[in-house]
Image (spheres, helix red, strand yellow):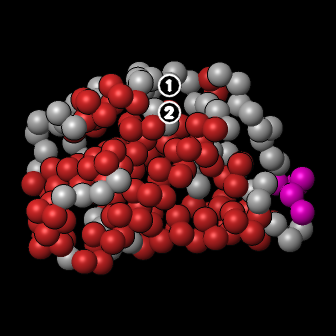
Amino acid sequence: MTERLAQLAYEDLAPAVRPLADDILKISSAALGGPYNALLRSPDMARRCFDLLDYLRFQTSVEKRLNEFAILIQARIANAQYEWWAHEPIARRAGLPDAVMDALRQCQRPAAMQADEALVYDFCVQLSLNHRVPDALWQQAVAQMGEQRVIDLTVLSGTYSMVSMLLNATQVGIPNGGEPPLQVMAPEDIRRQLLA
């Protein structure tokens, strides 16, 4: 797979775009790579996306372990190799168990989830694969998480679906020719296995 966009260099950016690049460089483990390489081609949109991603990653009401789990769910659903590669170590540092990540990587519902992880899994999988959540699941999520956290989780899921699409459309690879972490699966197989 060949990346479709040449990597932008900081010195090649227009002076008006460099403050945004400076903000990205403060928080991005990928420097100006990953999704930012594509987003910077549309600087006004990139600023808006950056601000949203900054909130969803670092200021959200959702606990970091659950937030990163939700991002990995999106990566698995979309076969988004780079997204999984970038977020698995962050999820691990946030306390998401390897057994949960390993099962999800294999496109299986993790068996050993804590109650809050199971709720996030069910909510994100239903929302992403069916574009809605059943009433009982919504009520359970609001009762256990509160409205703000459920809304933040919903927007996170949608936003990282967009990030997955951006990474896949531009064919962002694993840095330094690293091995892709996910087996690429057909959407119908992913759907069948994650909803099982």
Q: Nearer the viewer, residue 37 or 135?
A: 135
In the image, the segment drawn in magenta is 10-14
Split into 4 quadrants, where in the image is the C terminus? top left
Mark 1 surroundings within 10 Å by alpha-carbon count, few (fewer than 14), some (14 through 19), many (20 or more): some
Q: Which residue is mark 2?
A: 81
Disc 1 or 2, which lies upstream in sequence? 2
Residue 174 falls in which quadrant of the image?
top right
Residue 156 falls in which quadrant of the image?
bottom left
C-alpha span from label 1 to label 2: 6 Å
Point 82% across, 48% down: residue? 9
Residue 180 badge: 1
Split into 4 quadrants, where in the image is the N terminus? top right
Residue 89 in view (yes/no): no
Point 35% across, 49% down: residue? 128
Q: Is residue 20 above or below residue 109?
A: below
Residue 43 falls in which quadrant of the image?
bottom right
Mark 2 surroundings within 10 Å by alpha-carbon count, few (fewer than 14), some (14 through 19), many (20 or more): many
Question: Residue 181: x percent and y percent?
Answer: 44, 27
Question: Residue 127: x percent and y percent?
Answer: 31, 54
Q: Nearer the viewer, residue 77 or 10?
A: 77
Circle 1 SS class: loop
Q: Is residue 131 above or below residue 152?
A: above
Q: Hey, what amino acid is under mark 2?
A: Gln
Discs 1, 2 touching: Cβ within 8 Å: yes
